[in-house]
Image (cartoon, rainbow, N blue to C red):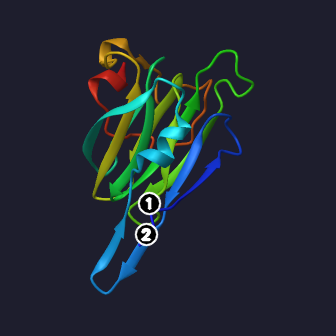
């Protein structure tokens, strides 16, 4: 099996990368590679490296985000289930400032996104459950929640069209 990734740029938001891993399907199931350093580290700035991974499991109708920070690169995927992934450009000097793009991702299409710093990240769960994977790259120590920004999921200036008007939200996302 060859390890291969199709890497492309978003057509809507400059700086956002779409990554599709090759997969091998056979009678027993499927196998694919989610990370290969020689290929994917070339997408990061010099002196930045992937340092740790996180997973979250969410129920149907859960909406997480819009969160981000000024420091970390996030390579995200949904390894089980189906979600609506939303990326918002929060770079004030960008020509796509406050523009957003959504992607349906999950275990059927294996799409991964590389999100630069200063972008908002959010997702809504379509399936009964979904397992979300973050691979984080940054310089120095990890930015935790206290160092992140939060934008209201239904901010009218951004105008995201979510599948539900009443999603399940965290305390952080209701404020």
Q: In the displayed structure, would residue 75 be above or below residue 139?
A: below
Using the image, tell me which numbered label, if any, was put on residue 1: none
3D distance between C-alphas at marks 2 and 1? 9 Å
Say whether marks 2 and 1 touch (CB < 8 Å).
yes
Secondary element type, mark 2? strand
Q: Nearer the viewer, residue 54 or 58?
A: 54
The 10 Å Cα crowd at callout 1, few under 14, some 14 to 19, many 20 or more, is some
- The mark closer to the camera, 2 or 1, is 2
* Residue farthest to the top, as pictured: 146
Q: Nearer the viewer, residue 175 or 55?
A: 55
The N terminus sits in image quarter = bottom left
- Numbered label tally: 2
Residue at the disc numbered 2 = 23
- Left or right, residue 155 beside residue 81: right
Residue 148 occupies which quadrant of the picture?
A: top left
Q: Nearer the viewer, residue 106 or 72?
A: 72
Please tell me which residue is depicted at 75% across the width and 25% down the height of the picture: 95
Q: Nearer the viewer, residue 164 or 35?
A: 35
Secondary element type, mark 1? loop
* Residue farthest to the front, as pictured: 38
Please tell me which residue is depicted at 30% across the width and 53% down the height of the picture: 130
- Left or right, residue 140 beside residue 163: left
Mark 2 or 1, nearer chain start: 2
Q: In the displayed structure, would residue 106 be above or below residue 173?
A: below
The C terminus sits in image quarter = top left
Please tell me which residue is depicted at 41% across the width and 31% down the height of the picture: 49
Q: In the displayed structure, would residue 167 be above or below residue 151?
A: below
Q: Position of residue 160 (x, y in %)?
A: 57, 37
Residue at the disc numbered 1 = 110
Question: In this view of the protein, can residue 163 be seen by the observer?
Answer: no
Q: Position of residue 163 (x, y in %)?
A: 48, 48
């Amino acid at each position: 099996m060859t390890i291969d990734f199709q890497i492309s740029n978003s057509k809507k938001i400059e700086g956002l990368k779409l990554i599709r891993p090759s997969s091998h399907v056979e009678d027993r199931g499927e196998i694919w590679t989610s990370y290969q350093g020689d290929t994917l580290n070339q997408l990061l700035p010099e002196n930045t490296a992937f340092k740790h991974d996180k997973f979250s499991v969410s129920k149907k109708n859960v909406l997480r985000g819009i969160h981000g920070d000024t420091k970390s690169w996030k390579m995200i995927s949904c390894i089980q289930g189906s979600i609506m992934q939303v990326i918002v450009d929060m770079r004030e000097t960008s020509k796509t400032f406050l523009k957003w793009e959504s992607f349906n991702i999950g275990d059927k299409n294996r799409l991964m996104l590389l999100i630069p710093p200063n972008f908002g990240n959010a997702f809504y769960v379509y399936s009964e459950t979904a397992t979300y994977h973050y691979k984080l790259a940054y310089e120095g120590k990890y930015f935790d929640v206290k160092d992140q920004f939060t934008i209201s999921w239904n901010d009218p200036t951004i105008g995201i069209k979510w599948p539900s008007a009443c999603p399940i939200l965290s305390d952080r996302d209701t404020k």
